[in-house]
């Protein structure tokens, strides 16, 4: 090869390549197919492309899974947080629903009695000692006076004992010093319901000649001038012959005093009663034996 | 680097570009791997080798991408030849030179493609200039990295021999 050509070999090669390529392109533009060349390249590339595609496809799949997993994790955390918030919201709503039920029951009771009442919230509860009292958030400024009846949605709670502005102390039926005029709904037999400083009360002065059965409903008789007649108080638990001519009758109050949250104070006090004596500490020497209900006595009802 | 490895690198670049354009189109538009391979050939093998490499890989790329057969081949052959000629006269191994060559080659390649298509009465589906800037940046980054990497391996291989 001459030196001239050898020195410019690359240049001539370039011209040849460029010319060939122009011819190829021009041929394609004139409608002549280059599909032979194209298909040759494609056939040649096909196995490489298949391998590369499967590898990258797998890699892309793994990547997608990873990205999805990351998103899932973040989404999971976000959803858990949301679930926590919703659970809290649900509990609040459930609490509101329960309160609504209680207040509705109180409202029904209020409307049924036809007496002016003061709804009140229980803010203190001493229903476990011998002296059994509640503190409620209504007092003399709301028209509350001593000896007014206090009722819950399921029955009688007790009576207002002492009053101060914005606060009242309520003596429960189960207080050791409490006494309530009651009668048995079925037989209309009257008696006095005495608190015992326990969760139960005793129904006294019922003659053994009278018919008393476990489960009998005890209601107020209205004779004490504190409670209107006909309010449910409790059910007869255990009935046993006492000393003398009276039955010893245990009564299970309908109201669960340690679960009270709202009560109604009945603005009615027909008979002014003397102020209750100051509560003395319980004398351990003379405790009253609590009357216990029989095993088959009916359970409490709210 | 042997001729076989060079051909393998060119094929890998062309196939890699096609596969990448299917898997991750945004990234595929960011650089032109066959062009980088041709530039490397130009630096290593001189104008004749780079010219043939560019024409071959360009045809391969045209066939795979479905464009007018010869467009990529012509632009890459031209770029390979010019880089090879430059490589005979200047040292293109340093980073700065490499980046300049990559940038200029990208511009030349793209301008050639657009020019050929214009001569052939074809229109581009996109405005070439933002795309060109993007590809130039990507080629400079990827190309300087890959060319540097292969150059370092080549030096190591030569030293061992």
Image (cartoon, rainbow, N blue to C red):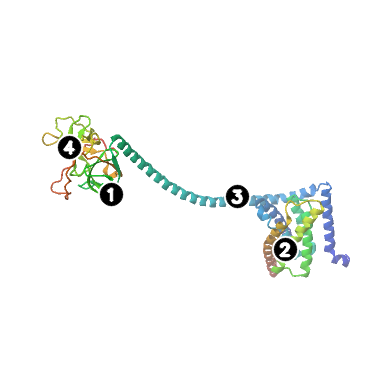
In whole angstroms, how far apart are the C-alphas of marks 3 and 2? Answer: 34 Å
Q: Nearer the viewer, mark 4 or mark 2?
A: 4
In the image, B118: left or right of A170?
right
- Residue visible at 61% across and 52% down? A59
Chain hosting mark 4: A
Look at the image and tell me whether residue A44 can be seen. no
Residue B90's disc is none
- The residue where tag 4 is placed is A192
- The residue where tag 1 is placed is A166
In whole angstroms, how far apart are the C-alphas of marks 4 and 2? Answer: 109 Å
Residue B103's disc is 2
- Residue visible at 57% across and 52% down? A67
Chain hosting mark 2: B
In whole angstroms, how far apart are the C-alphas of marks 1 and 2? Answer: 88 Å
Chain hosting mark 3: A
Residue A197 percent location from the top left of the image: 20, 44
- The residue where tag 3 is placed is A61
């Amino acid at each position: 090869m001459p030196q001239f050509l050898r020195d410019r070999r690359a240049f001539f090669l370039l011209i040849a390549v460029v010319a060939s390529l122009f011819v190829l392109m021009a041929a394609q533009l004139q409608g002549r197919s280059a599909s032979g060349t194209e298909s040759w390249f494609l056939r040649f590339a096909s196995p490489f492309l298949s391998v590369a595609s499967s590898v990258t496809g797998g890699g892309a799949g793994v990547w997608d899974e990873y990205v999805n997993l990351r998103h899932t994790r973040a989404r999971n955390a976000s959803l858990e947080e949301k679930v926590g918030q919703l659970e809290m919201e649900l509990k609040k709503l459930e609490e509101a629903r329960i309160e609504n039920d209680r207040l509705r029951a109180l409202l029904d009771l209020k409307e049924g009695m036809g007496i002016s009442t003061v709804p009140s919230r229980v803010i203190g509860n001493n229903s476990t000692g011998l002296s059994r009292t509640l503190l409620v958030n209504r007092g003399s400024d709301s028209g509350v006076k001593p000896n007014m009846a206090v009722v819950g949605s399921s029955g009688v709670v007790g009576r207002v004992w002492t009053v101060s502005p914005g606060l009242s102390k309520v003596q429960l039926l189960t207080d050791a010093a409490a006494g309530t005029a009651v009668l048995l709904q079925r037989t209309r037999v009257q008696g006095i319901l005495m608190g015992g400083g326990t969760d139960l009360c005793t129904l006294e002065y019922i003659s053994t000649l009278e018919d008393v059965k476990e489960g009998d409903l005890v209601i107020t008789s209205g004779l004490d001038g504190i409670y209107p007649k006909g309010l449910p108080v409790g059910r007869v638990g255990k009935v046993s012959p006492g000393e003398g001519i009276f039955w010893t009758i245990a009564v299970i109050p309908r109201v669960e005093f340690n679960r009270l949250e709202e009560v109604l104070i009945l603005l009615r006090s027909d008979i002014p009663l003397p102020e209750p004596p100051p509560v003395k500490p319980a004398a351990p020497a003379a405790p009253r034996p609590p009357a216990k209900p029989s095993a088959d006595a009916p359970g409490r009802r709210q | 680097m042997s001729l076989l490895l060079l051909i393998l690198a060119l094929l890998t670049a062309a196939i890699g570009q096609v596969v990448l354009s299917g898997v991750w189109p945004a990234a595929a538009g960011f650089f032109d791997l066959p062009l980088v391979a041709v530039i490397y050939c130009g630096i290593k093998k001189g104008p004749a080798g780079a010219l043939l490499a560019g024409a071959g890989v360009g045809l391969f790329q045209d066939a795979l991408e479905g464009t007018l057969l010869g467009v990529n081949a012509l632009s890459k052959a031209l770029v390979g030849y010019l880089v090879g000629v430059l490589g005979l006269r200047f040292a293109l191994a340093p980073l700065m030179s490499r980046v300049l060559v990559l940038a200029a080659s990208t511009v030349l390649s793209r301008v050639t493609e657009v020019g050929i298509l214009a001569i052939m009465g074809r229109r581009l589906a996109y405005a070439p200039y933002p795309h060109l800037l993007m590809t130039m940046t990507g080629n400079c980054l990827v190309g300087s990295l890959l060319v540097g990497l292969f150059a370092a391996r080549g030096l190591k291989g030569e030293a061992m021999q």
